Image: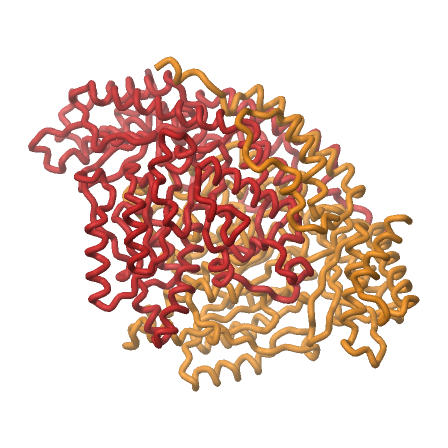
Chain colours: A orange, B red
Amino acid sequence: MGEANIGLKPIDAEEFRKHAHEMVDFIADYYRDIESFPVRSQVSQPGYLKTLLPAAAPEDPETLEEVFADIQSKIIPGVTHWQSPNFFGYYPSNSSTAGLLGEMLSAGLNIVGFSWITSPAATELETIVLDWLAKLLKLPDEFLFGGNGGGVIQGTASEAVAVVLLAARTRAISENKRKGLSEAEILSKLAVYTSDQTHSCLQKGCVIAGIPLENLVTVPTDISTNYAVSPAAMRQALEDGVKQGLLPFFLCGTVGTTSSSAVDPLSALGDIAKDFGMWFHVDAAYAGSACICPEFRHHLDGVEKADSFNMNAHKWLLTNFDCSALWVKESSHLVSALSTTPEFLRNKASDLNQVVDYKDWQIPLGRRFRSLKLWFVMRMNGASGLRSYIRNHVCLAKRFEGFVREDPRFQLLVPRTFGLICFRLKPESDDPDNGRTLNSTLLEALNSSGRMFITHTVLSGVYTLRMAIGAPLTQDKHVDAAWKLIQEEATTLFEINLVKGPSHILANNLCSKNLNT
Amino acid sequence: MGEANIGLKPIDAEEFRKHAHEMVDFIADYYRDIESFPVRSQVSQPGYLKTLLPAAAPEDPETLEEVFADIQSKIIPGVTHWQSPNFFGYYPSNSSTAGLLGEMLSAGLNIVGFSWITSPAATELETIVLDWLAKLLKLPDEFLFGGNGGGVIQGTASEAVAVVLLAARTRAISENKRKGLSEAEILSKLAVYTSDQTHSCLQKGCVIAGIPLENLVTVPTDISTNYAVSPAAMRQALEDGVKQGLLPFFLCGTVGTTSSSAVDPLSALGDIAKDFGMWFHVDAAYAGSACICPEFRHHLDGVEKADSFNMNAHKWLLTNFDCSALWVKESSHLVSALSTTPEFLRNKASDLNQVVDYKDWQIPLGRRFRSLKLWFVMRMNGASGLRSYIRNHVCLAKRFEGFVREDPRFQLLVPRTFGLICFRLKPESDDPDNGRTLNSTLLEALNSSGRMFITHTVLSGVYTLRMAIGAPLTQDKHVDAAWKLIQEEATTLFEINLVKGPSHILANNLCSKNLNT
């Protein structure tokens, strides 16, 4: 039996201490040097890593030094640097000292907090920090613990909308059964209403929940409302749907759409949802963070009419990915939809119904101690620090918006509201694809330069560049340099007769030019 | 505009370095001292933390020292120590030096790897390490990349079974539509088959996917097969279901059930699934790790007939939570079910269909760089180290099994296969609840002592104690001490006239007694 004592010690405190100090220095050096890396990975050949790594795990242990060497030479070149101050793509995904410390501690304790009993501190800290954040956002009291509501940390806004969709579905099935409909009939007619700007995670949620996609009704939007949904159009769509026999049960509004940061009129949508007996969900994944500032809070007006509200602290509130905060007014709807309690998970505290068991508020069973990082972020920055952080980015975004307005070659596609600027290089009036090639070429030239990274969308059929300012280290000089580069690339583009050469060769030329400057 | 440069620097490399070194020492000290903490949190009053923390976030930043002080005095007492060598509850959730280093780096880079382009290294390393792990498990080549299959890291086994259930549902709907059935009719008849020992995550998956729970058919098991499902009973249930008009589409087998580590006969189930045209999923969340050892690999025989296979590297393979590895033979089924591609996520590499975009293999859109920790674990331990690690625990479990067999007051409920021992204190033959009170009292006495932590289940109606040996630091001395404590508590229980006093008072007495020893 002695052999049982022999063998590796998978976590020796002193070995961990030594190696983890090395890792801290590696990460600190990474942030120190982050501007030296091309923002978008310069790897262009899919499968690059397979040619660099062995085909199988090593039989014998390797040293941390060997792993670090591979990270430097093989992994880092394949990383797109979301924390670079020159990352302006998608929406940001914030890291911070506080968030990282919270991640470290969470991984260190490595508890699995599915039920209260599996670590009371994990559940309780989560309830407390979500109350804190709800108060920073001035959410109505019904979203706080103490009554029937409360908050929970999901991984992503996709999971958040999926769980409330499931809760709403369960409620709707139950209500319609009472009216004498069969479950199969109900499921085939349940309908979801939203705008055509709503994030694709709602569509995915419908697929998951078995809502037929033809019952996902997306109301068109346009520039006349800055891509916010029109309450009149929404009401009309609902009336049409009901006439066709649909059972509308879920309405989703967005504060800060992904394409253009549009803000739906929550209050009007809330009234409509009430009139039709629907669950009203508000997705503020991106722009929710801004609403901790009084000057932005009005964008949430009407949230008091919502059944659920979601924002991603991992996007723009310095909390490392993942941390998507979801609040509901009636948590019992989540529990009705998602609770399972096999014998092996039963315990006295749960049986007495005295505690929150977050396993019943989410899709997975297991869950990490994610509230720690949010707690670290709120404490080490303070509410005032977080507000300054948001305001800095918004100020930078205003600055960039001003640059675009001043250069007649460019066009703003929609007024800026938060940290996102939607713009493009104006095409010639006879441009056959209305600027798509022109601007996608510009995008590729910028991104392959490695000096900045932006992404695109399409608004009313127009190919649009998205400059999302919100990386933790972004300052004036980065925004200024980005604009200078954009102007230079635009100049180059107009100098070259675009129609003559294939665009990928053009992009490569631009790339080389920039890399040589 | 100058104010934009002023304000906090949310991640300053040198400030991070200083603070993160402190955090490393905090975590290293935690592991050094881990045996000094009561294993199960001694917090008994739900809401304890609310009385200790402020009701709102601080307005101004606080120092790391203030946060650390609260962690020591307020958080740690509320933590149940899953990494304690005396944690034997549920199934283990492993931490390790390598896993922690990987977590740190993943949090440090903080990329969001939903598409290949968002960090090619993240997607590619994941494909490579899942191939590595598949080879360690000797999975058939169809589960590896290079053909139509491949692996993906999910958060949990719940998410893994949910996504394959959705993939199978999409396939089944499409197949049955071709036979002329309507979608509503199909959805109401789709049926899932499994054993009554299958984890509750399958039930939750059915709820999510809109499979009516009456169409989740659980075939009963008993001790005659050690709680493995009988192929004959499964086939009979399927034939009955088909006669009743059900459309069986998903069969789930388990290698290492949660209650008792039962192993379903995969090969026979695979044949049955094929006969009925069903998707065959194998859940080896717990015991999959053991199958990297040749002496356990036979438990996976038949996996070559499966459509999907899942094991949790975060349970018993030293990879910090969460890391649930899922392999499929035909990844196109996942993509068909789960893909959404809004304009703002389009990019050249994805449009050319040259790359894996893992967003289409999972429920969330965003995803962390989780392959790093699995890569660290395989490299820093080596295949030989991982096998030794498993063997050490199995050896300890054999040792404990021997202890139970030697004490006539105790009874093994089912033979041990991996690291779990199911046992109980034998009740008197006239015990009105057949040992439930006796053993739940023993369980509570052990857990409230703080000296060890186990959980329970029910097998064939019998309340059963589960001793799951698999925490990273567990050695002979911990297993021996646990057994000694169990014996002592049993002696105490038999000395007291159990029927006289209410059990919670008894438990409290026992708790105090132990705390004073």
Q: Position of residue B449 (x, y in %)?
A: 33, 25
Q: Position of residue A86 (x, y in %)?
A: 78, 50
Residue depicted at x 82% and y 60%: A505
Quadrant location of the N terminus of chain A?
top left
Q: Report whether B161 appears left or right of B253.
A: right
Q: Residue furthest top?
A: A2
Look at the image and tell me whether residue B513 can be seen. Answer: no
Residue depicted at x 20% and y 18%: B406
Residue depicted at x 83% and y 73%: A426
Q: Residue furthest left?
A: B430
Q: In front here: B479 or A80?
A: A80
Residue depicted at x 39% and y 18%: A4
Quadrant of residue A186 within the rendered picture: bottom left
Q: Report whether B43 appears left or right of A266.
A: left
Q: Position of residue B58 (x, y in %)?
A: 62, 43
Q: In front here: A380 or A366?
A: A366
Look at the image and tell me whether residue A13 can be seen. Answer: yes
Q: In front here: B132 or A481?
A: B132
Q: Report whether B296 appears left or right of B358.
A: left
| Residue A210, above or below B440 | below
Report the label total: 0
Q: Position of residue A280 (x, y in %)?
A: 49, 68
Quadrant of residue A396 within the rendered picture: bottom right
| Residue A473, above or below A483 | above
Quadrant of residue B109 within the rendered picture: top right
Q: In front here: B292 or B494?
A: B292
